[in-house]
Image: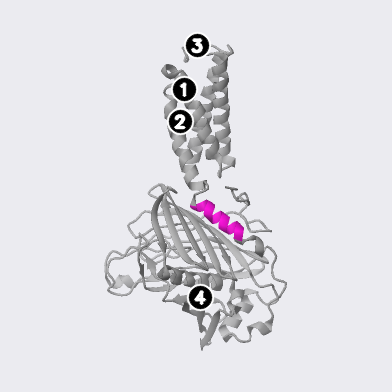
Amino acid sequence: MARIALVTLVVLHGFIHLLGFAKAFGLAEITQLAQPLSREWGLLWLAAGVILLATAVAVVVARRWWWTIGLLAVGISQVVIFSSWHDAKWGTAANVVLLIAALYGYASRGPRSLRTEFEQDLLHEWPPALSPSDALIEESDLAHLPAPVQRYLRRSGVVGRPAVTDFRATWTGRMRSGPDKAWMTFNAEQMDVIDPPRRYFFMNARMKGMPVDVFHAFDSDGATMRVRLLSAFTMVDAKGAALTRAETVTLFNDLCCLAPGALLSPNTAWTPIDGLSASAQFTLGTNTITAKLVFDDAGDLIDFVADGRGAMSSDGTTITPMRWTTPMHDYAEVGQARVATKAEVRWHPESGHGPMVSSSSHRWLTTSRSAATAADKTPLVANIHISTYLRGRCTKSTAIVDTTPGFDTHAARPVSRLSPRLGFPLGSPRQPYGW
């Protein structure tokens, strides 16, 4: 809606500038412009009008760099307005609106934006994995796994196919920080690389109508999380050992849910529990995390339980330890893969826990409780809708997350289609900015 309003304003503003050209060249009697205009000034009015109209087009078709044309349009437009200030001064208001929009465009899409950093990381990591591995996963590769994990990998369709080397996921949905808080819509995109493990995540949400950018990076240097209001003002700038450990849990959960063939990695040590569950120790660097995987009688993964994935405070300074689970269900054949189409993501505060406020963290979004009661044991959940591209196969998976009592349920909106070759959402940039 805001983009439509901006385009409408800029188009009208551009056509009004053409009146100055018409007056200077005697093409029409423009009573609104009483001051005489030379042909030189008329050409400048024409240039301003054309560049403004080009800006309107760029807002729609060139979202990454439209702000460059917009800033030029503001400059030229304001010059001609000053030349006929008595008649055209009200055009300054439109220029102020356009200037604010262009500055936001620079902050959100310019060379120093979180989105640009994410896209450059993504494009840097993606090309080496363009060709899937020639080696196929064989039945013998599963022999060392606990029986329920073997069944899960067979049902997921990994046997006889190349190992997944990387994947991308995009989704839209909404989140909120508590039962009495307003919903915030969001769209997000991430890329995971299996070996060496890397994860890059970018989310754009709206908080009280204002855009918020979130960028998580997880690589050999550890994990970082940055949040900017209006793409310019830093709200969270988190890093450190606790965040890296939490992100290690998140990465392993990604592998379990979205790329189960990666569970054959030597980084994972397995311990059988019973016929329907197994314990996994996943090691990255100095971090070893433990998770319990629970399966149903058919062999589908139905829950992921870990204690190392705490909930982050709203300012990103602390991470509160608590149990983290991701129950999933409604498996279906999607493309060449068999995946869960519905899931829940939950943080489990312990009984007696004091007031807490948690924030979004990667794909899984938290809610908060305002009192320490028995209800604190009620899981905290969020809504997600995922479309995933796995190297060697393309899958789409919807995760409509249940909510705690008193919370509204919400079916997430459809995500963008994916390119069959690279997995890029159609129409998204495939080249870096070049700065």
Q: Which residue does the image show at 49% across and 50% down from the upper left?
A: 113
Which numbered disc, 3 or 2, marks the residue that appears first in the sequence?
3
Side of 266 relative to 99 (left or right): right
Residue segment shown in magenta: 114-124
Is the C-beta separation of discs 2 and 4 under 8 Å? no
Which mark, by number, is residue 81?
Answer: 1
Residue type at mark 2 is Asn
Q: Residue furthest right?
A: 134
Q: Position of residue 64 (x, y in %)?
A: 56, 45
Which residue, given by chain and number where applicable, does mark 2 sit on?
A: 95
Question: What secondary structure is found at the residue carrying circle 3?
Answer: loop
**Figure coloring:** one colour
- Residue placed most toward the observer, 247 or 272: 247
Q: CA distance from mark 1 to mark 3?
A: 13 Å
Q: CB of mark 1 within 8 Å of CB of mark 2? A: yes
- Report the residue marked by disc 4: 285
Task: Please indicate whether residue 41 sits to the left or right of residue 228 in the image.
Answer: right
Q: Amino acid at mark 3?
A: Pro
Circle 3 is placed at which residue position?
36
Element carrying mark 2? helix
Amino acid on which disc 1 is placed: Ile
